[in-house]
Image: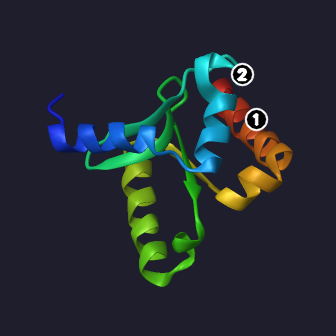
Amino acid sequence: MNIDPQLLAFAKSMRHNATDAEALMWQVLRAKRFMGLKFRRQHVIKPYIVDFYCHEIGLVIELDGSQHGMDDVIEYDAERTKFLEALGLTVVRYWNNDVLGRTDMVLEDLWEVCGGLKVN
């Protein structure tokens, strides 16, 4: 697979500059800690970089900050989700403040999503 080296470099820099919500979620997901699933962070799915990706069940997890509530970003996110879903992937989105403040609720929802995808 031929991936733009600049995109890979940007993904790597994003891994080193994670938001607090991304850092918390990575502690839960890394090293097959969550349901025995292998997740990658800041993974390139050309032309995008997704926050977290599990190839085994075709799941993309996006963590959104407040900027994702603005009209132009909502539109961009919708196009991005449509593109990823056209590849057969499932996309779930969580707000950063929910990941940080309502972690149990986010993880319960994620557990249900992953459980449903593992069965298929």
Q: Residue 92: x and y, percent?
A: 60, 50
Q: Quadrant of the C terminus?
A: top right
Residue depicted at x 39% and y 70%: 76
Circle 1 residues within 10 Å: few <14, some 14–19, many ≥20: some
Question: In the image, which disc is placed on residue 111?
Answer: 1
In-front residue for pair 120/94: 94
**Quarter residue 118 falls in:** top right
> Sequence-wise, which precedes: disc 1 or disc 2?
2
Residue 120 seen in render:
no
Q: Residue 23 location, x and y as percent?
A: 61, 40
Q: Give the residue type that dot 2 points to.
A: Met
State the image coordinates of residue 17 (x, y, percent, origin top left). 46, 45
What residue is drawn where x is 68% and y is 33%? 114
Above or below for 120 versus 95? above
Marks 1/2 in contact by CB < 8 Å: the verdict is yes
Query: Looking at the image, what colour scheme do you see?
Result: rainbow
- The quarter in which the N terminus is drawn is top left
| Label 1 SS | helix
Residue 35 is marked as 2
The residue located at (84%, 48%) in the rendering is 105
Quarter of the image for residue 26 reads top right
Looking at the rendered structure, the secondary structure element under dot 2 is: loop
In the rendered structure, the answer to whether residue 76 lies left or right of residue 21 reads left
In the figure, is residue 109 to the left or right of 71? right
The amino acid type found where label 1 is placed reads Trp
Q: Give 35 or 96, whichever is nearer the viewer.
A: 96
**Is there any visible trace of residue 109 in the rendered image?**
yes
Furthest residue to the bottom?
71
Task: Say which residue appears at 55% left-offset and 28% top-offset.
Answer: 57
